[in-house]
Amino acid sequence: MYEILEKHTLTPITKLFRIKAELIARAARPGQFIILRVHEAGERIPLTIADYDSETGTITIVVQEVGATTRRLGALEEGEYILDLVGPLGNPIDIPEGGHIVGVGGGFGAAALLCFMRSATLRGDRTTTIVGARNKDLLLLVDELRIASRNLEICTDDGSTGFKGFVTERLKQMIDGDPPGRPDYIVAIGPMPMMRAVAETTRESEIPTLVSMDPIMVDGTGMCGGCRVTVGDTVKFACVDGPCFDAHQVDFDEAIRRTKTYLREQETACKRLETEGVIHAS
């Protein structure tokens, strides 16, 4: 059982939880994830470790309420417990020191960049974080990311704050020489279409680009094969070979198709929760 020490509502469907998990916090590295189960009959879902503190023995996760399990998790409050929590899983983000590292976060992906950008900044790299959302009210952890990186670029589709346009448009300007300058390495985390767009933006310039893949995942040990991703000509498992892969080698068409495999079951589960009164219809 893992106690929820803090809960913050970031957007109407996005919650931040700080959880007591001493062993995981001690071993965690940027880019890794956990798998949790809310209750005995619940499914296991992967979530990126947004932050960790080995001294206090806590980890931070950010949850976007999409399916039944994330909505059930979002309904928990401070002082309540998560039944199972396993991690850290996957490989840390591995980028050489000394260059201009740019993190690109779309939607909930901005939170997943937090600890990586902080670690890159602290080791002395030049760092820029580009975060985007449809409007300013949907931006996540802007103040924290501003501290974690040397430069923060904010993009909104409607222009309500920062650059008006997509994160890829601002990234292309930087690649073409606009301040703060051309990236040497890029890490993109967010919705699959956004990560694919980043990959296409950087392909011609051949800037090394990593994307964090979050396919359907069950056991987190490479046994079930549910999280397979085609990278180049090879089938990889996101849980043990990733979650980060070379963006220019990922088969995004296949990955996006696989994320839609259980949409009907997801809708059925959400309707069941609404009937039970656990969540409200959106």
Image (spheres, grey):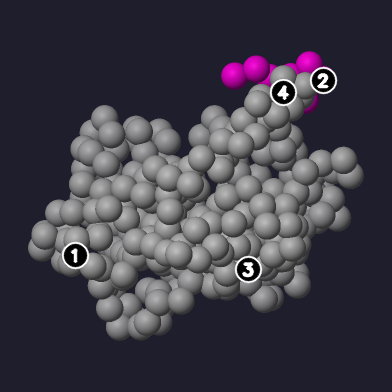
Residue at 15% in and 54% down: 173
Determine which residue is flagged by label 1: 205
Q: Earlier in the sequence, mark 1 or mark 3?
A: 1
- What's under tag 1, amino acid-wise? Ser
Mark 3 vs 2, N-terminal side? 3
Mark 1 Cα shell of 10 Å, populated few (<14), some (14-19), many (≥20): few
Q: What element does badge 4 sit on?
A: helix
Q: Which residue is mark 2?
A: 276
Residue 268 - label? 4
Task: Give the residues in magenta.
Answer: 274-282
Which label sits in the foreground, 2 or 1? 1
Kind of residue at disc 4: Thr
Picture coordinates of residue 53, whole percent (x, y): 62, 69
Mark 2, residues whose alpha carbon is within 10 Å: few (<14), some, or many (≥20)?
Answer: few
Observer-nearest residue: 2 or 167?
Answer: 167
Residue at 23%, 67% in the rendered image? 206
Looking at the rendered image, the quarter that the C terminus falls into is: top right
Does 133 sit above or below residue 62? above
Inter-mark Cα distance, 1 to 4: 44 Å
Check disc 3 and report the residue beneath it: 240
State if disc 2 and disc 3 touch (CB < 8 Å). no
Amino acid type at mark 3: Val
- Against 75, is 182 above or below? below
- Residue 20 place in picture, x, y as percent: 75, 60
> What's the residue type where badge 2 is placed?
Glu
Question: Which of label 3 and label 2 is nearer to you?
Answer: 3
User: For numbered disc 2, what is the local secondary structure?
Assistant: helix
Please provide percent x and percent y for residue 263: 62, 30
Q: Residue furthest front?
A: 233
